[in-house]
Image (cartoon, helix red, strand yellow):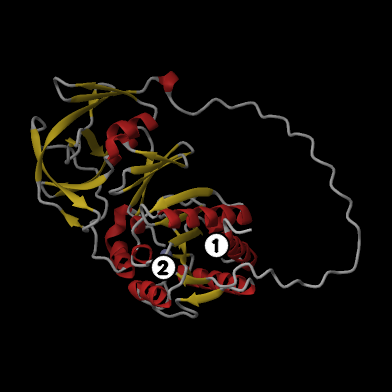
Amino acid sequence: MKTPVWKRAATLLCALTMALGLNPLPALAREDVPAASDRTGSVQVSLFDEGERSYLPAQTLQVIRILMEGEELTGSVPAFLREGRTLFPLRLVSEALGATVDWLGETRQAVVTWEDRHLVFTLGSPVALADGEEQLLPDGVGPCLASSAGEERTMVPLRFLAEWLGLQVRWENATRTVYLTTGEESRPGEPEMPEEPEPPGEDEPPVIPGYPEEPERPAQTLKGFYVAVDAGHGGYSTGALYEGIREKDINLPIALRVAELLEERGCRVLLTREDDRFVDLYDRSYMANDAGVDIFVSIHANASETDGDFQGIFTYHCPGAQRAKELAQAVQNEVVQATGAMDWGLLAERFVVLKATYMPAILVETGFMSCHEELMRLIDPEYQEKLAQGIARGIEAYLTAGQD
Ligand SMILES: [Zn+2]
């Protein structure tokens, strides 16, 4: 999948949203215009509805003042109160502390990187991924896009972000002011734990040389199951493009190999594409619905244009889809185990192929093409084999769970 940087997001997002079958969405807005507006009282703000993919009518919201170490943080969209929570322009507070923000356009996510820690916000979602752990945001108030007086900003829950960044947060009701301070001793970064000595390993059983084994036919563990394997992009939809390598060309061989591995286990497989052709996202979903497959597994590769070191594997499921989440976890576990890649865990997202499919559906982001080393692995057939083995094992684990 493509994850354009927000500073040049417009064109990329266009191509992207086209590929996703969505209406063009507003990009994250930049945060370089100093405040000019009156910051007392209230402000007229329109909030973007992620479900409807459009702005809601403007509403009047209480403005909140933010002081960091005594200095006022101001942007052209002020901090405001929504459902009892202060939302604040993401860039301002994170950049004031030297954190970086990457915008994953395709998934509508902002990744805040601070030192070697990561915090992932998903627009419209009350759940954030803080250092790999899912956390419910206070009062369930999630980040959102806000537009005011022609300016657009990504607003995030202030207290949650500030505390994650190790700031002290104090609220003064009379003046509607939030005071942020950096108590040096309270900054995060856990003290290094002394490493436990490795327990002595069990003695390996001696290997007895014998006859070379016949290649065994894998056990028919998936007989009776029917799985859709979806190679992301294809045709004019190239997906991410790095170093002359197109995402669609990485997704396809992995998907074909996953299909093979499943078939070897007796599974029926529906491939949404078997060659380099464009297939509409809704058509992929309807194909799976019409065929009545048991599960749907989409295979993509990721990219971040702002952080060339960002790497690892995510698996997506539709928000609230419990069985999809279990499938996603099973696949994520096995893929990470098979590849040794960085484990980013699960994320919830309403991708077309996840929301228009009736069965448990997931989307695996096999790695970051924007990271040179990971890109080199992604095009390596041996690494693709590991990815495919991991995905197939995850599918098998999910489908056979609870069986004897
Ligand atoms: Zn993709």
Q: Which mark is residue 116?
A: none
Indicate the position of residue 116 as horizontal and vertical percent values: 49, 38
217 lies left or right of 88: right
Task: Name the residue that disc number 1 marks.
Answer: 399
Work out whether mark 1 precedes mark 2 in sequence or the reverse, and give the earlier one.
2
Q: Is residue 236 visible?
A: no
Picture residue at 36% right of the left edge, 23% below the top? 182
Indicate the position of residue 197 as horizontal and vertical percent values: 73, 30
Q: Which of 45/335 is in front? A: 335
What amino acid is at disc 1?
Answer: Leu
What amino acid is at disc 2?
Answer: Gly
Please determine whether, in this image, residue 314 is positioned above or below residue 118.
below
**Could you classify mark 1 by the number of other residues whose Cα lies within 10 Å: few (under 14), some (14-19), or many (20 or more)?**
some
Which image quarter is the N terminus in? bottom left
49 lies left or right of 134: left
Task: Name the residue that disc number 2 marks.
Answer: 239
